[in-house]
């Protein structure tokens, strides 16, 4: 987390130093992560209320799709729940695109089950065994005698990639897993199935699902910020080159402690500060 924090400080300092003149009114396109979507939705709504002459188009589709859109020039800002990959940097450079990252919030990926499930905690090894398909029944990990229904994110998702790295250690998720296109879809699937397990960003927790501890640690604001929760991460917005005009003004708004960061907290995620 210390390295990320230093990046955040530099990005914030640079933004507030450069943004001495009001941005020109215009249109913005934002595409990318469904994890970041609740933050973006609240922030966009508040920003356009403050600046009614600005029109912003916002859509999800996954972190990979957002970064791809930024590289091909079809979005001004890409939202992502992971950092850029080497192959994305290479493709961007080939197209004369310089990707600049701004951390906007912190998140933890929380394993969730149906509220009727008596399981409260799973280790990383237990989660890995479930998602590999080795553990097939909840009774094997102290739960009810029920077959486990596995729900996972699609491969374009930054949440999937973080889960793959931190939980699966790059090993393959079982083909039996039901693949979902968004955090919201995971919540719906798990809330409607007492056999199910899934994983979601902390901002998507709701009474319809039961959050599990991981290695005995609960995913909270504190454990997300200090990095003790085993599956925590920063969330990003990317631009092509250092932002200017309306793009710069919007990102300044997102990271402002009295403005956008309030919407981060209201969305259920963890503020930068």
Image (spheres, rainbow, N blue to C red):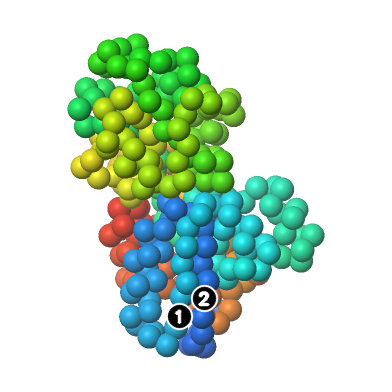
Q: Tally the numbered discs.
A: 2
Residue on which the image places disc 1: 55
Do callouts 1 and 2 mark residues in contact (Cβ within 8 Å)? yes
Vertical placement of residue 118 versus 184, above or below = above
Residue at the image point whose x is 36% and y is 48% from the top: 184
**On the rendered image, what quadrant is the C terminus found in?**
bottom left
> What secondary structure is found at the residue carrying circle 2?
strand
**Residue located at (45% from left, 33% from top):** 178
Which one is in front, 186 or 126?
186
Q: On screen, 63 above or below 11?
A: above
Q: Nearer the viewer, residue 61 or 130?
A: 61
User: Is residue 211 at least partly visible in the picture?
Assistant: no
Splitting the image into 4 quarters, where does residue 10 fall?
bottom right
- Residue 26 tag number: none
Q: Which residue is mark 2?
A: 28
Position of 166 with respect to 271 (left or right) is right
Q: Position of residue 129 (x, y in %)?
A: 46, 18
Regarding residue 159, the answer to whether it shows in the image is yes
Which secondary structure lies at badge 1? strand
Percent of width and height locating residue 201: 38, 45
Q: Please give left or right for residue 220 compared with residue 76 in the image.
A: left
Image coordinates for residue 208, horizontal then vertical, percent: 23, 40
Circle 2 crowding by C-alpha within 10 Å: few under 14, some 14–19, many from 20: some
Residue in view at x 68 percent, y 64 percent:
72
Q: Is residue 143 above or below residue 50?
A: above
Q: Would residue 114 be found to the left or right of residue 185 on screen?
A: left
| Residue at horizontal 27 percent and vertical 13 percent from the top | 145
Q: Quadrant of residue 51?
A: bottom left
Within 10 Å of disc 1 (Cα), the crowding (few <14, some 14-19, many 20+) is: some
Residue 65 % position (x, y)? 58, 55
């Amino acid at each position: 987390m210390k390295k990320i924090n230093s990046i955040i400080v530099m990005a914030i300092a640079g933004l507030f130093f450069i943004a001495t003149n009001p941005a020109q009114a215009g249109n913005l396109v934002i595409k990318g992560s469904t994890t970041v979507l609740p933050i973006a939705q609240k922030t966009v709504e508040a920003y356009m209320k403050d600046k009614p002459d600005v029109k912003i188009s916002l859509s999800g589709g996954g972190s990979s799709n957002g970064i791809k859109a930024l590289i091909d020039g079809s979005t001004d800002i890409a939202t992502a729940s992971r950092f850029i990959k080497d192959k994305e940097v290479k493709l961007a450079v080939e197209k004369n695109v310089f990707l600049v990252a701004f951390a906007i919030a912190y998140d933890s990926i929380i394993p969730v089950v149906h509220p009727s499930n008596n399981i409260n905690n799973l280790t990383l090894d237990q989660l890995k065994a479930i998602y590999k398909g080795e553990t097939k029944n909840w009774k094997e990990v102290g739960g009810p005698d029920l077959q486990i229904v596995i729900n996972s994110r699609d491969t374009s998702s930054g949440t999937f990639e973080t889960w793959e790295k931190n939980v699966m250690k790059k090993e393959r998720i079982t083909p039996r897993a039901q693949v979902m296109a968004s955090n919201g879809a995971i919540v719906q699937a798990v809330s409607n199935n007492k056999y199910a397990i899934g994983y979601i960003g902390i901002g998507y927790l709701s009474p319809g699902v039961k959050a599990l501890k991981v290695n005995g640690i609960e995913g909270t604001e504190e454990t997300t910020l200090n990095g003790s929760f085993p599956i925590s991460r920063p969330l990003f917005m990317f631009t092509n080159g250092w932002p200017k005009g309306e793009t710069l003004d919007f990102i300044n708004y997102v990271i402002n402690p009295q403005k956008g960061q309030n919407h981060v907290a209201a969305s259920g995620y963890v503020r930068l500060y």
